[in-house]
Amino acid sequence: MSRIKATVTIRDVAEAAGVSISTVSRVLNNKVDVAPETSRNVQTVIEKLGYTSSLAARSLRSRKTNVIGLVLFDIVDPFSVQVLRGIDRAIRELDYDLIVYTSGVFRAKQISDRERRNVSLLDSSITDGIIIVAPSADTFQTVSPIVVIDPNHENPDYPAVIAQNCEAALTAMKYLTSLGHQRIGFIGGRPELQSAIQRMQGYRDGLCQAGLPFDPDLVQVGDYYKETGYLCAQRLIKLPDPPTAIFAANDQSAFGVYQAAQEAGLRIPGDLSVVGFDNIPESAFVTPALTTVDQSIEQMGFLATGLLVRLLSDEELENRIYTIPTHLVVRESCAPIHKL
Amino acid sequence: MSRIKATVTIRDVAEAAGVSISTVSRVLNNKVDVAPETSRNVQTVIEKLGYTSSLAARSLRSRKTNVIGLVLFDIVDPFSVQVLRGIDRAIRELDYDLIVYTSGVFRAKQISDRERRNVSLLDSSITDGIIIVAPSADTFQTVSPIVVIDPNHENPDYPAVIAQNCEAALTAMKYLTSLGHQRIGFIGGRPELQSAIQRMQGYRDGLCQAGLPFDPDLVQVGDYYKETGYLCAQRLIKLPDPPTAIFAANDQSAFGVYQAAQEAGLRIPGDLSVVGFDNIPESAFVTPALTTVDQSIEQMGFLATGLLVRLLSDEELENRIYTIPTHLVVRESCAPIHKL
DNA sequence: CTGTTAGCGCCTTCAC
DNA sequence: GTGAAGGCGCTAACAG
């Protein structure tokens, strides 16, 4: 019923089965050259003793664990959860296990150091390869392959999965300008990420194509979190000549805008139009439902896992960057600008 | 820029610093008896080489990793995500890291074997202690402490965190009967879990206290997933004398009821009242908003982490079972039964 | 087909 | 205050 005190090691199995340790190891790893009877016997003993080989010892020795590591900046973030969903789906079809690694330090100053530490902790320890989501750090020391989702702007050397950010942001801007908006605020994402940079670029391109001037006052630097989005939105709203629409670099920032708008007595979309980015599930539930860019986050996780597994099989990847298509999901958070 | 080929080991550090391996080890573990200057020197080299000690080797040798393991039946389940939230919050305040373990086999027949395997993989390998959520298996072989969230009905030997299920279910039933409902269907949860058993008990108690007969036809065995909830609801709805209300053992099952009701052309709450259990975030967003029992899932994760850490410090726990209070959250999915 | 031997990277006595 | 040696549990040659 309760837990058994001692760990069962390969040695215990060997003794109980009356064979050598290496024979047990051979059975464990399905090597050839084991007498069927011996094998069966060992299996039985393993079963009876409830033996499981130590991941630590195994990986220390053999550098092959069949475990994929995932390093997340924030495990409970909706974006992470969606990524996880995709990875989980991919993993189920494969002979790999998944270990998700997170750490106590959260949004700390030294987050990239922490990230590096996490990565090297997994690497060459218990993991065959690692997926890193939205890294703050630009480089990692690893022996094993890495695939990055939403890469840092500095690391073109790891295979990466990223959404078609710039184009999507441009589409969103075109939508807003087609509605007549001329003063459009922008709340950016984590500046070290390519996604944030590209979305910002799309914002500027959109302005440009509509013949609208770029006003630095209308641009706020966010970090993809709601709280910061809220703060940014407050600043935007308080401007002498406030925007009639805000394009937030992700949905959570957009939710921050919702909050700021409500507190300022601004109705969405009547007084203020809002567009987000990500299309996390919550964006459909919120009132009014958020118009946003869908970037198939789940798909990004799925794809990244597949790429990593190919890398683990020593396959060459044809690309360095894998771009995921995006599309605008129009819901109820935008309205034509009202005539004066 | 890119990844460096070789792993940096303690030996590399020792050589580069011109000291022995043991000295480096001592510095690593903040042992006394190291000359300040030596220590500083070694630190510098560690920094420069970007050395991180191998989790695998460390745990193999010393049995103390400062890593807590979490084994989940389904990492993307909303319940799990909420638990994760609580654990994450707790972890941040502690000097522990968190590893979440999941595996490719999903809702497999041998799920409990898989679970056991996962647990012993973490145990005595890379983890100081383990939190298990809603286990299918009733026993685990471990050297290190275990804390269970939503325990199996068979394992009273691990410290466990569980909601006040029976009372809460009774409250929900009272609410339904007070609305005049007499034929109330029940969709159960995973039968091996205490939570499911207790909720079922609350259902029966509720019937009893209202002087209503227990009709086996009105009880369906679910598994806490939406798809199954949907199937169960279909069966309930097709009954010759169908229920006017359904109490689902968790919110996801309730969402399955929503789907079945919609397909059958039944309006909620007009034609069918629905009560859920869990109060996952989605339940507030759904239309009509779901009346459900809040069981502070996040709190369960937080508490469990605290308990585990105390166990790791060799503290004695005063209780075996920690019960989390619950309360009914009335929203819009229930209506008084209409008079004929 | 199976046993013996030698480490993987690290921590822990035990000497010096 | 520091180094040398042994071994944690396991796999990978090498013998036999």
Image: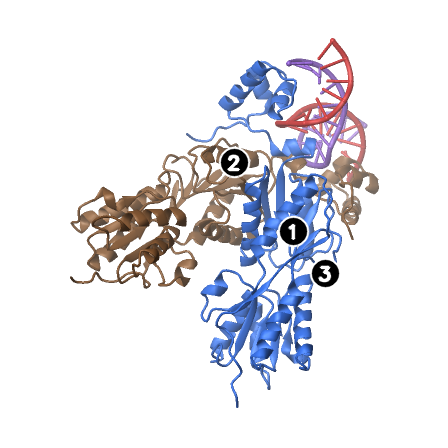
Chain colours: A blue, B brown, C purple, D red
Residue that badge 2 annotates: B119
Residue at disc 3, secondary structure: loop
**Which chain is disc 3 placed on?**
A
Name the residue furthest bottom.
Answer: A340
Q: From the top left corner, tell me how far across and down residue B212 is, in percent.
A: 17, 49
Q: Amino acid at mark 3?
A: His
- Residues under labels 2 and 1: Cα distance? 24 Å
Residue at disc 2, secondary structure: helix
Q: From the top left corner, tell me how far across and down residue B315 is, in percent.
A: 48, 40
Q: Amino acid at mark 2?
A: Val
Residue that badge 1 annotates: A132
Of A105 and A141, which appears nearest the observer? Answer: A141
Residue at disc 1, secondary structure: strand
* Residue neighbourhood size for the residue with mark 3, other residues' Cα within 10 Å, grouped as few (<14), some (14–19), many (≥20): some
Tell me if residue B29 can be seen: no
Residue that badge 3 annotates: A153
- Residues under labels 3 and 2: Cα distance? 38 Å
Q: Amino acid at mark 1?
A: Ile
Q: Is residue A298 left or right of residue A262?
A: right
